């Protein structure tokens, strides 16, 4: 059994099958390119929407340290039972990396508790992702910014809760800005939302983007903390005398 940390890459895998332009960029799916960009540091598994249980069985999730999520066309097709399964694993400590249009996924909206809506425009604009938190582990080795010659624009206001930390802010040719790298904690789990990755551009081949995804996996790894105990409890340290009601 591998001693490497286990990462599951989940991709809807619909665009690549339906759109020749997307298939020409990602012939084996975006999940395959993301996996290739991560090298051999992690024990990688990929799964897609149309597999039984979307590939996210109890066994797979229980063996996953960090889950990467990309979806767009078929958010509504993701079964609520599977969403709840992922949600509980995040609360228990599994890391979650949500990419690009995954902001509208059921799991991200459930974890955020907001609409997660935003402005968008597909015009092949230049994007610069500026590092605004250079000491953060997710920004390690990235430099001052990542430049993408063509990307879809996402613009503020991004309807998410106030992030625990913002690592990247994007600027686009049209003038908009966007919180493109935002960190959250829910229960024992760490969540990172990373904006770039529109299917008609070769974003996941970019070395800087690959670096950020690898860094975010390391950051989101389970800490090993135990789930707090809830409900009725007895005094853990000092006995107390029984008192009558007043």
Image (cartoon, helix red, strand yellow):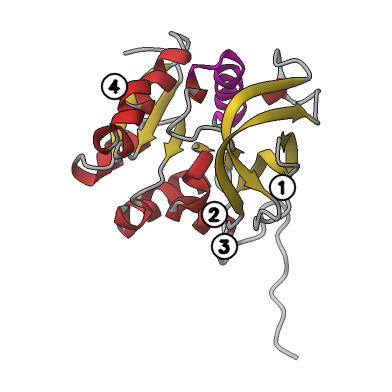
Residue at mark 1 to residue at mark 2: CA–CA distance: 12 Å
Residue denoted by label 2: 111
* Magenta segment includes 220: yes
- In depth, the one of 133 and 242 nearer the eye is 133
Residue range in magenta is: 205-221
Where the N terminus falls, by quadrant? top left
Q: Which of the two marks, 1 or 3, is nearer to us in this view?
A: 3
Instruction: Tell me the CA gap for discs 1 and 4.
Output: 34 Å
Q: Earlier in the sequence, mark 1 or mark 2?
A: 2
Q: Measured along the vertical axis of the image, is residue 242 above or below residue 172?
A: below
Image location (x, y in percent) of residue 75: 37, 53
The label shown at residue 155 is none
- Place of residue 88 in the rendered image (x, y in percent of width and height, measured from the top left): 44, 50
Q: Nearer the viewer, mark 1 or mark 4?
A: 4
Do the residues bearing badges 2 and 3 touch, measured as CB atoms within 8 Å?
no
The residue where tag 4 is placed is 28
Farthest residue to the bottom: give it: 246
Residue 209 within the magenta-colored segment of the rendering: yes
On the image, the x and y values in percent for residue 129 come to 70, 29
| Mark 4 or mark 3, earlier in chain | 4
Of badges 2 and 4, nearer the viewer stands: 4
Q: Nearer the viewer, mark 2 or mark 3?
A: 3
Q: Earlier in the sequence, mark 1 or mark 4?
A: 4
Query: Is the residue marked by circle 2 packed among few (<14), some (14-19), or many (20+) residues within 10 Å?
Result: some
Whichever of callouts 1 and 3 sits on the residue coming sooner in the sequence is 3
The residue tagged 3 is: 115
């Amino acid at each position: 059994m591998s001693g490497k940390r286990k990462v599951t890459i989940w991709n809807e895998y619909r665009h690549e099958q339906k759109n020749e332009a997307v298939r020409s960029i990602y012939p084996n799916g975006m999940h395959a390119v993301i996996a290739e960009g991560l090298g051999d540091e992690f024990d990688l598994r990929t799964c897609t929407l149309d597999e039984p249980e979307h590939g996210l069985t109890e066994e797979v999730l229980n063996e996953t340290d960090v889950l990467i999520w990309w979806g767009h066309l078929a958010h509504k097709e993701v079964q609520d039972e599977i969403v709840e399964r992922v949600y509980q694993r995040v609360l228990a400590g599994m890391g979650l990396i949500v990419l690009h249009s995954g902001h509208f996924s059921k799991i991200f909206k459930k974890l955020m508790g907001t609409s997660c809506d935003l402005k968008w425009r597909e015009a092949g604009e230049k994007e610069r992702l500026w590092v605004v938190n250079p000491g953060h582990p997710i920004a390690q080795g990235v430099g001052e910014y990542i430049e993408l010659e063509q990307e879809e624009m996402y613009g503020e206001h991004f309807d998410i809760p106030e992030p625990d930390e913002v690592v990247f802010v994007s600027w686009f040719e049209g003038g908009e800005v966007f919180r493109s790298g935002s960190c959250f904690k829910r229960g024992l789990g760490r969540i990172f939302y990373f904006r770039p990755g529109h299917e008609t551009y070769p974003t996941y081949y970019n070395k800087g983007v690959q670096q950020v995804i690898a860094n975010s996996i390391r950051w989101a790894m389970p800490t090993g903390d135990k789930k707090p105990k809830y409900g009725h409890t007895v005094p853990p340290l000092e006995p107390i005398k029984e008192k009558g009601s007043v």
